[in-house]
Amino acid sequence: MQDMRDLIDNLNLLIIRIFTAVKSEKGQALVEYALLIVFIAIVVYLMVKGSGRQVNCVWSSINSALGDV
């Protein structure tokens, strides 16, 4: 859980730096793309973290089945 908080803190710092560094209309598009990338990264991270336990369970089942042969 601490890793997730660190990730969110780092992403928030990145967003703040982008907002302060760029204030033109070009910067607005850049910030929108950055926010989109950050959102996608968070979703992918949560999906991988959430499915990890299930993948481990399936792998263990396969490994047990092969060990009996």
Image (cartoon, rainbow, N blue to C red):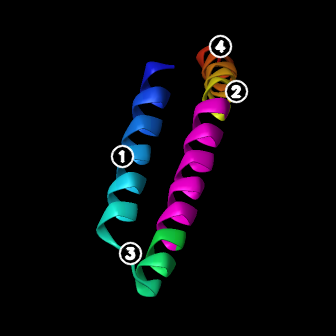
Question: Is label 1 or label 3 in front?
Answer: 3
Given residues 39 and 61, the one toward you in this image is: 39
Distance from disc 1 to disc 3, alpha carbons, whole Å, reads 17 Å
> Residue at the location (56% across, 46% down)?
42
Question: Is label 4 or label 2 in front?
Answer: 2
Q: Earlier in the sequence, mark 1 or mark 3?
A: 1
Q: What's under tag 4, amino acid-wise?
A: Asp
Question: Is label 2 or label 3 in front?
Answer: 3
Q: What's under tag 2, amino acid-wise?
A: Gln
Q: Is residue 39 left or right of residue 28?
A: right
Q: Look at mark 1 in the image and give the residue it sits on.
A: 13
Q: For mark 2, give the secondary structure.
A: helix
Distance from disc 1 to disc 4, alpha carbons, whole Å, reads 51 Å
Question: Is label 1 or label 2 in front?
Answer: 1
Q: Look at mark 2 in the image and give the residue it sits on.
A: 54
The magenta region covers 33-50
